[in-house]
Image: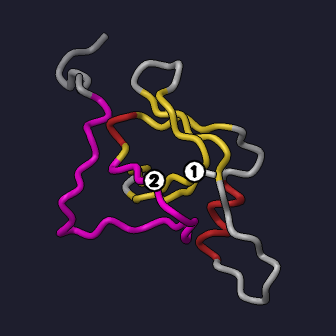
Amino acid sequence: MRIFRIQFVNQGKIYQLFAETVVQADVYGFVEIRNLIFGENTGLVVDPAEERLKSEFSGVSRTLVPMHSVVRIDEVEKRGQSKILELDENANITPFPGNLFPPDKGTKR
């Protein structure tokens, strides 16, 4: 089984997910991520960050991420910990501008 680690920027944070399938989406400009892999919570220790991601993506069969939000995609040997990382002020990762055409402030319609 192939396992991919995907890191992408979402709302000013870096999401790190693990999935079995990563392909170019049918929707132009998006990466399709399917078969997300989360750890089993059979033990006594539960990671709250991974549980938050698991609940956020519960019921999702596939997710589409804009290509310009993807930081990197790695094929890895085994699954690691899914997590959400805060971007610090000194980070050299800058999200692509969401709105290329800002609204005119001086004109009324």
Please say if 31 is above or below 27: below
Q: Is residue 3 left or right of residue 106?
A: right
Please say if 52 is above or below 45: above
**Residue 92 found in image quarter:** bottom left
Q: Nearer the viewer, residue 46 or 77?
A: 77
Q: Which residue is mark 2?
A: 75
**Residue 14 found in image quarter:** bottom left
Q: Nearer the viewer, residue 109 or 100?
A: 100
| Three-letter code for the amino acid on which mark 2 is drawn | Glu
**Quick check: marks 2 and 1 in contact, CB under 8 Å?**
yes
Q: Is residue 93 left or right of residue 12?
A: left
Q: Residue at x 66, y 57 (%)?
A: 37
Location of residue 46 in the rendering, given as x and y in whole percent from the top left corner: 71, 81
Q: Is residue 88 magenta?
A: yes
Location of residue 29 in the rendering, given as x and y in whole percent from the top left corner: 39, 24
Mark 2 → mark 1, Cα distance in angstroms? 7 Å
SS at circle 2? strand
| Three-letter code for the amino acid on which mark 1 is drawn | Arg
Q: Residue at x 42, y 68 (%)?
A: 85
Label drawn at residue 85: none
Residue found farthest to the right:
42
Tell me which colouring the rendered structure shows. Answer: secondary structure
Q: Which residue is mark 1?
A: 2
